[in-house]
Image (tube, helix red, strand yellow):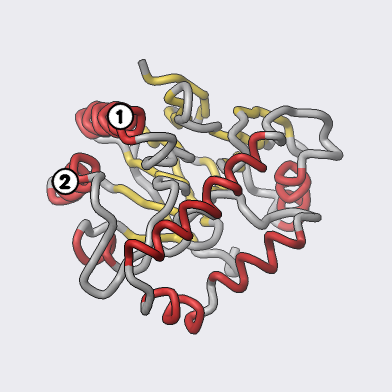
């Protein structure tokens, strides 16, 4: 397994969650969700869990050289304190926060992952990531993602005043989320492009036991090939969904 980054996670409890979209739809509801996320992180830290936050932590994020978005101080402070105390936390970029740069790594000691990752844990092999741009179809978004990943475009965006830049970005971010809402139902395996991606990877890497992704805003637990499962952790926009791996068994839960 040399194509993707691989890590060995020795934790006896590992948790996965994605699609928090902090910042929407308004300040009060976002703050409520942020406080719930902080409480969940605190509880998992007491259990010495490894924590994987798998994309779209924010509905929009952009780091200027000397400026990061306002708000989220409860979350950022909690992440810094937990990593200072030795809790392992890993963050993936999503399609809404792909412009996470080095702030998390320098200030919070959290590594940022931009591609799927292999994790060896509890005698299992996991492939985890956000899930955007994977699998067949969605060529328009794949071209858009490639454009947004261009350093020249990022440089030009950084030249814009934050008030204007964030206004434009949030407009398009809202359109992306609204468009995605129409996809929040399972139709068939032929329509489930992330499942198709997992099936292809299972053929390439037959040792994989679990595929864990987000992005779809839909909780899923589907078989993939022989003895493998594709888990989608859903979103925190309504219920606080997460998955936990203990004793080699992966289960989906809701934090209340």
Q: Which residue is depicted at the point 54% across and 49% down?
A: 130
Q: Nearer the viewer, mark 1 or mark 2?
A: 1
Relative height, residue 13 to residue 120 (above, below): above
Task: Find out whether the residues at labels 1 and 2 contact each other: C-beta distance under 8 Å.
Answer: no
| Residue 54: % across, % down | 46, 46
| Residue 86: % across, % down | 18, 48
The C terminus is located in which quarter?
A: top left
Q: Residues within 10 Å of mark 2 (few under 14, many from 20)?
A: few
Residue 75 image-quadrant placement: top left
Q: Earlier in the sequence, mark 1 or mark 2?
A: 1
Q: Is residue 185 left or right of residue 104?
A: right
Res. 45 in view? yes
- The dot on residue 230 is none
Per the image, label 1 sits on a secondary structure element best described as helix
In the image, 177 versus 240, the foreground residue is 177
The N terminus is located in which quarter?
A: bottom right
- Residue to which mark 1 is pinned: 28
Q: Which residue is depicted at the point 55% across and 54% down?
A: 172
Relative height, residue 237 to residue 98 (above, below): above
Residue 72 image-quadrant placement: top left
- Residue to which mark 2 is pinned: 77
| Residue 124: % across, % down | 53, 41
Q: Is residue 26 left or right of residue 125?
A: left
In the image, 96 versus 111, the foreground residue is 96
- The extreme front residue here reads 164
Q: Residues within 10 Å of mark 1 (few under 14, many from 20)?
A: few
Q: Is residue 220 left or right of residue 16?
A: right
């Amino acid at each position: 397994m040399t194509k993707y980054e691989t890590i060995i996670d020795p934790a006896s409890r590992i948790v996965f969650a994605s699609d928090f979209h902090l910042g929407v739809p308004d300040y009060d509801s976002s703050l409520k969700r942020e406080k719930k996320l902080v409480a969940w992180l605190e509880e998992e830290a007491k259990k010495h869990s490894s924590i994987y936050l798998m994309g779209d932590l924010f509905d929009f994020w952009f780091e200027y050289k000397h400026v990061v978005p306002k708000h989220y101080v409860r979350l950022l402070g909690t992440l810094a304190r937990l990593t200072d105390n030795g809790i392992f936390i890993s963050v993936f970029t999503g399609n809404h926060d792909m412009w996470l740069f080095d702030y998390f790594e320098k200030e919070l000691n959290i590594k940022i992952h931009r591609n799927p990752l292999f994790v060896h844990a509890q005698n299992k092999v996991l492939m985890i990531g956000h899930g955007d741009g994977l699998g067949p179809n969605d060529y328009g978004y794949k071209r858009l993602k490639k454009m947004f990943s261009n350093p020249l475009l990022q440089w030009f965006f950084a030249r814009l005043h934050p008030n204007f830049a964030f206004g434009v970005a949030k407009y398009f971010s809202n359109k992306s989320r609204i468009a995605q809402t129409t996809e929040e139902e399972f139709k068939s395996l032929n329509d489930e492009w992330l499942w198709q991606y997992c099936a292809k990877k299972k053929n390439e890497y037959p040792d994989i036991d679990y595929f864990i992704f987000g992005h779809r805003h839909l909780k899923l637990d589907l078989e993939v090939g022989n003895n493998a499962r594709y888990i989608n952790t859903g979103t925190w926009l309504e219920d606080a969904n997460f998955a936990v791996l203990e004793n080699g068994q992966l289960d989906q839960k809701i934090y209340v």
